[in-house]
């Protein structure tokens, strides 16, 4: 009887562990889906940390442009910072911040963005993504 109880408890523990793992996997999958959706949906997507000097510098660079659709996620304000950084690694190859995506493509961090800007390539990249207010398609005025 004691042996049966021990086996039953062991099976229950294994089952509970598997359920917990499944729930954790689902949560991570949901988080990854959210990150991917943000990267694809927003013309300019930035992953940053509020205290990071490189993140601050990247945001200063981007502030020089009238960006129409930009989302900034401050990873240090999340309770899933490490998980988010591991997910981002799949799409950028790195866990460090800042990370800049334009039109769903990883551009780089501060240093890469600064180099692109210094070569005069950042504005054209943002224009090609239709990410600037200045190159929005005008809406015809129907006299309304």
Image (cartoon, helix red, strand yellow):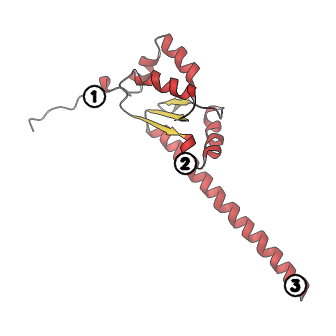
Is 33 on the left or on the right of 18, as rendered?
left
Which residue is depicted at the point 42% across and 18% down? 123
Q: Is residue 117 visible?
A: yes
Label 1 vs label 3: CA separation? Answer: 72 Å
User: Of discs 1 and 3, which sits in the foreground?
Assistant: 3
- Which labelled disc corresponds to residue 6? none
Mark closer to the chain start, 2 or 1 = 2
Most foreground residue, 51 or 20: 51
Could you tell me residue 32's position as x and y percent? 58, 47
Element under disc 2: helix
Mark closer to the chain start, 3 or 2 = 3
Disc 3: which residue: 4
Most foreground residue, 122 or 74: 74
Disc 1: which residue: 137
Most foreground residue, 87 or 53: 53
Label 2 vs label 1: CA separation? Answer: 30 Å
- Specify the farthest residue to the left: 143
Which residue is depicted at the point 31% across and 23% down? 135
Which residue is depicted at the point 41% across and 24% down? 63
Structural crowding at the residue carrying mark 1, measured as other residues with C-alpha within 10 Å and reported as few (<14), some (14–19) or many (≥20): few
Image quadrant containing the C terminus: top left
Mark closer to the chain start, 1 or 3 = 3
Q: Where on the picture, by quarter, is residue 140?
A: top left
Q: Where on the picture, by quarter, is residue 76?
A: top right
Q: Where on the picture, by quarter, is residue 24?
A: bottom right
Image quadrant containing the N terminus: bottom right
Element under disc 1: loop
- Specify the farthest residue to the front: 51
Could you tell me residue 89's position as x and y percent? 65, 36
Disc 2: which residue: 33
């Amino acid at each position: 009887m004691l042996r049966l109880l021990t086996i039953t408890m062991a099976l229950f523990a294994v089952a509970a562990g598997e359920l917990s793992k499944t729930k954790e996997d689902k949560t991570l999958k949901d988080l990854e889906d959210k990150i991917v959706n943000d990267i694809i949906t927003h013309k300019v997507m930035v992953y940053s940390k509020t205290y990071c000097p490189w993140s601050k510098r990247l945001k200063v660079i981007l502030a020089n442009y009238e960006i129409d659709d930009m989302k900034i996620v401050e990873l240090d304000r999340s309770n899933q910072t490490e998980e988010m950084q591991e997910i981002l690694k799949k799409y950028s190859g790195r866990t460090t911040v800042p990370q800049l995506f334009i039109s769903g493509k990883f551009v780089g961090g501060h240093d890469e963005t600064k180099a692109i800007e210094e070569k005069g390539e950042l504005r054209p990249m943002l224009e090609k993504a239709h990410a600037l207010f200045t190159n929005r398609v005008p809406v015809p005025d129907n006299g309304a």
